[in-house]
Image: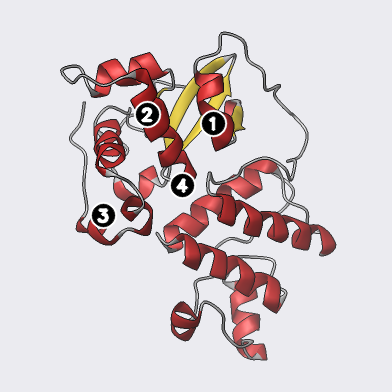
Amino acid sequence: MPNRILKESIRTSDSISQLNWFEEVLFYRLIVSCDDYGRFDGRIPIIKGTCFPLKDVTNKDIEKALNKLVAVGLAGHYMVEEKPYLQLLAWERHQTVRAKKSKYPSPDEGEMIAHENNCKHMQADVHVIQSNPNPIRESESYSGDARLDEALNEYVKFRKQMKKPMTKRAIQLAVKKLQSMSDSVDEQIAIIEQSIMNGWQGLFPLKEENRSKKQGQFYNDMEEWLHEREGICDDSVSD
């Protein structure tokens, strides 16, 4: 298992600051347990045995901590062929991917699970969420964070109104792009609101003054023109 990287920014991370001590320890132990793509077996007993082989912790402890990691947007759970898996989010931003292939299926091959139902599926023998080959449903969780999901739903509706609908893959890419622009959920929401407010198809970094206000004035016509042509998340319905 390659060495993993912990950056000093964890000390001021909004997501990590919401964790208690055990949840934070589990997060760090998952980092050194996941494969080179940030993926791991999603079954609670496996996570418990791998991350805490010498500690007296219960499945319930792991279950509650995992739910919190998903709720704050640090991890996501998904099902592939009736088996649960774990994905640490924003992995490629912080870790070096060396392996050519993951040990586990990609989230794209299955169905993401909303965080309130995570452990129910992780301990079940039967896959109760059916794979949906059609475009995304607005009721499902995109990011694992309720507030960010609400903003993303508004963005999806906005894109439909523009006649530029988004596929499930496009939304996953949008979430990754938001995470690459900011670790703060509040700023990620502000980025979405900025695009909706200005009528932009893509997602763009906040202007400096918008970071403090979380909402800024409209860009002038020239800035909008440049953004629309140099956009960093100009996705479309075709994958």
Q: Is residue 113 above or below residue 201?
A: above
Residue holding disc 3: 10
Q: Which mark is residue 73?
A: 4
Q: Which of labels 4 and 2 is toward the front?
A: 4
Q: Which of labels 4 and 1 is toward the front?
A: 4
x and y, in percent, of residue 55 in the image: 18, 21
- Separation of residues labelled 3 and 4 (CA atoms): 14 Å
Residue drawn where x is 45% and y is 35% of the image: 67
Label 1 neighbour load within 10 Å: few <14, some 14-19, many 20+: some
Quadrant position of residue 21: top left
Q: Point out the tag, 4 or 1, that comes first from the N-terminus.
A: 4
Question: From where the camera sits, is residue 124 visible?
Answer: yes
Q: Which of labels 3 and 1 is toward the front?
A: 3
x and y, in percent, of residue 11 in the image: 23, 58
**Between 141 and 181, which is closer to the camera in this rendering?**
141
Residue holding disc 1: 107
Q: Point out the tag, 3 or 1, that comes first from the N-terminus.
A: 3
x and y, in percent, of residue 204 in the image: 55, 70
Residue holding disc 2: 100
Q: How many marks?
A: 4
Tell me if 156 is positioned left or right of 69 in this view: right
Question: From where the camera sits, is residue 174 visible?
Answer: no
- Separation of residues labelled 3 and 1 (CA atoms): 25 Å
Q: Is residue 153 above or below residue 49?
A: below
Q: Is residue 9 above or below residue 5?
A: below
Tell me if 5 is positioned left or right of 146 in this view: left
x and y, in percent, of residue 37 in the image: 38, 33
